[in-house]
Image: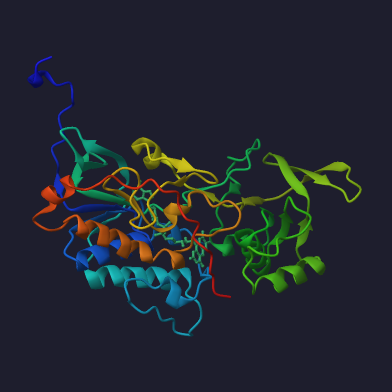
Amino acid sequence: MKPSESTDPAPHEPNRVCDVVVVGGGPIGIETAIEMRRNGIDALVFEAGPLGHTISWWAPQTRWFSSNDRISIAGVPLNTIDQAKASREEYLNYLRSVVDQFDVPVETFSKVDKIEARPDDPRRWQVQVRSKWIEASAVVLAIGGTDHPNRLNVPGEDLPHVDGYLREAHHYHGRRVLIVGGRNSAVEAAIRLHRVGAKVTLSYHREELPEASIKYWLRPEIDGLIRSKAIEALFESRVTAITPERVDLDQTLPDGRHHTLHMHFDDVLTLIGYEQDKTLFKQLGIRMEDPGGKPIYNDETMETELPGIYVAGTAVGGTQSSKYQVFLENCHVHAAKITKHLLEYGIGSRNTDAKRQAKPSATPELNRQIEMNPES
Ligand SMILES: Cc1cc2nc3c(=O)[nH]c(=O)nc-3n(C[C@H](O)[C@H](O)[C@H](O)COP(=O)(O)OP(=O)(O)OC[C@H]3O[C@@H](n4cnc5c(N)ncnc54)[C@H](O)[C@@H]3O)c2cc1C
């Protein structure tokens, strides 16, 4: 074949060119973009939903577990009027202010559908957002790890009265609600719905609520409500089917025998954790490791095995199904690590191309486990 007859597809005509595309407008995507822009790197953020999408779908007035100094970003203090841990609303307000203060270019409701290397230059990346193509020297995947609620995988799960999210608590006044789960989200929902006048039943598959994984201030309250039977707890039970009229549960009795319960509920909330959307990792061919399909990256630089593709924020933890170890509070360092690495190779400076050419490929070292250090 003559050189001119290459079968490589033509590169997409870019609608925009920048140094770095940051995928995800959560706290770490924003913090990373600010750090880069402070260092002269032209970073654009694309966010699939509204700014801070993950936090925006928490139930109204949910409070952070972490204290304010640990979830503040870019050196901007996060103060609440009563010095309490920030609520969802206070944090979203804060995030908007930080974006405005630093004039961070964020395109909301702009999902990144595809990322591919430029066919004629594998050191440049093309990012597709709807019908637009953006070309960049590097891409940061700050996509979080809680994209979809985990599923029970039982018949009837998609019925309209079944939901994987707690929404406005007020809706549940006077209703019979089954909450499936036994960690933070489920316990917090059980207490809140009980307080708004719902009749709450909690179904959990273990014989008692877990010691860890529940906000320390909720624990005495849920224990008291269960003891007093204000909330009905069905331990060692599993939902097996849901219909509009009833929910079937299989429960293990203290003597080891099983029995089936048929109960009626107006609403069923399945609050059993969240799953990461791995579409972009798979599409790029980023290797992942168990548990949870954590992307493999270099811990010094946050670069994956694909030169120019980085991961940041809770995205590095994959799907964190049981004990969460990667939190916002232990991810702030990612912004500086990535920025330093980009600067070393001249991204953002005039010399970008020459320096990147000399760049060694990423070290495929296994991810070091990030120690959980929540403040109690
Ligand atoms: C109820 C609840 C309470 C929590 N409490 C705490 C706490 O107290 N402390 C703590 O540290 N953490 C807590 N977390 C976890 C918390 O959500 C994260 O710490 C924080 O949001 C992580 O920030 P991030 O920027 O890494 O990811 P996220 O905030 O999840 O941001 C990722 C963003 O990427 C976007 N995105 C994903 N794919 C694409 C795509 N293809 N194109 C464009 N955009 C995309 C998403 O829409 C999302 O906005 C809690 C989570 C939940 C659900």
Task: Locate ligand 1 by image quadrant.
Answer: bottom left
Residue 90: where, in percent of width, then height?
42, 73
Q: Residue at x 18, y 60 (%)?
A: 41
Where is residue 166, by image quadrant?
A: bottom right
Of 351 and 190, the residue lying toward us: 351
Q: Residue at x 33, y 56 (%)?
A: 301
Residue at the top extreme of this rendering: 1
**264 above or below 71?**
above
- Quadrant showing the N terminus: top left
Q: Residue at x 39, y 68 (%)?
A: 92
Residue 76 shown left or right of residue 176 in the figure: left
**274 above or below 55?**
above
Residue 160: where, in percent of width, then height?
57, 44
Q: Is residue 246 visible?
A: no
Residue 25 shown left or right of residue 203 in the figure: left
Of 104 and 192, the residue lying toward us: 104
Where is residue 7, by image quadrant?
A: top left
Residue 133 shown left or right of residue 317 in the figure: left
Of 229 and 266, the residue lying toward us: 229
Residue 186: where, in percent of width, then height?
64, 59
Residue at the bottom extreme of this rendering: 82
Q: Is residue 16 visible?
A: yes
